Image: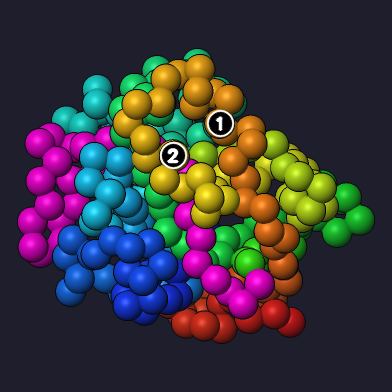
Amino acid sequence: MCYIASNTKPEKQIVERFEATMLIPELYEPYYFAAGYMYPNLYCIPMEDPQHIYPMEWGLIPKWSENNIEKFRNSKYKTWNAKGEEVFQKKTYKDPALHRRCLIIADGFFEPHYPDNNFKGKAEPKYCYLPDHQLFAFAGLYNKIGNGDIDMDGDTEFSVTLLTTEANDFFKYVHNKKKRMPLVLDPEVEGEWLNPNLTQKQIEEFIPHAFINEDFKEHTVPNFYSQDIDTNSKSVILPK
C-alpha cells in the first residue's frame, strides 16, 4: 500500500523526538488512519526550514497542475508515493528530489498481505510499526503550491509524497505481491536527507542504503475493511 499511515503521538513527544516545533500547533491532531486518497495533512520537516514541522497535503501536486488540482487528483496518475530508484527518471519528482526533500513523521503504516501467496484472493491488511510503537520518519518529497504560504486556518499550500524502495526480507513477506516498502529513514541519516548540498549522484547512492537499522513488527488488522469503523479510533490498528 504505502499510502496509509498513522501518527498517534502527542505534539510534545513529536517535538522532543525531532527537535522541531509545529508551525501551526493548534492544527495538529494525532491520527490512527490517514490515507492518500483522503488527501489529509501529514506532518513534515522540510529541508528549507528544518526547525519547523509543516502540515503538507498527501499527494504531490506537480507544478504544471497546481492551477487545476482537482483535475489532477481525478486522473489515474497518483502521487501518494514514488519509487525511490526512479525519482530522477520522472519529471514529476526530479526537481523535488534535488531541492525539496523532507521528513514525514509517522509511527505506523499499513501494507497488504496475501495469505498463502494467493494474489487472486483478498489482501489481509497488516499494520507495521517499530518496537514500542516509536516515532520514525519516511523520506519524502514536497512541492509548494503557489507561493507556499500557510494560513492560520490550516489551509496548506504544500503537497508531499513518500518514497518507496525494494523490500527487505521482512517486507517481502508482508507486502508479498509487489515486494515494496516505504523508505523509513534510519535516525542517523535523517539530517543528511535534509542536506541541501546533496548532488543527484549522492541522493541516488543514499536511497538504497538509508532504511532504518531496526526490525519492524506487524500484525493483521481485522477491522480495516469495516464500513462502520471510525478511522480516527485506536480500534483501526488493533490486532485480531
Q: Can the viewer see residue 43 in this picture? A: yes
Residue 110: x, y in percent?
Answer: 61, 60
Q: Write down the residue under mark 1.
A: 206
- In the figure, is residue 29 to the left or right of 118? left
Front position in the image: 20 or 23: 20
Q: Write down the residue under mark 2.
A: 193
Specify the quadrant of the image occupied by residue 191: top left
Where does the C terminus fall, quadrant-wise? bottom right
Residue range in magenta is 131-159
The answer to the question of whether label 1 and label 2 lie on touching residues, with beta carbons closer than 8 A, is yes
Q: Earlier in the sequence, mark 1 or mark 2?
A: 2
- In the figure, is residue 90 to the left or right of 215? left
SS of the residue under disc 2 = helix
Residue type of the residue flagged with mark 2: Trp
Identity of the residue drawn at 81% across and 47% down: 169
Crowding at mark 2 (Cα within 10 Å: few <14, some 14-19, many 20+):
many
Residue 25: x, y in percent?
Answer: 20, 71
Q: Give the spatial CA distance, label 1 vs label 2.
A: 8 Å
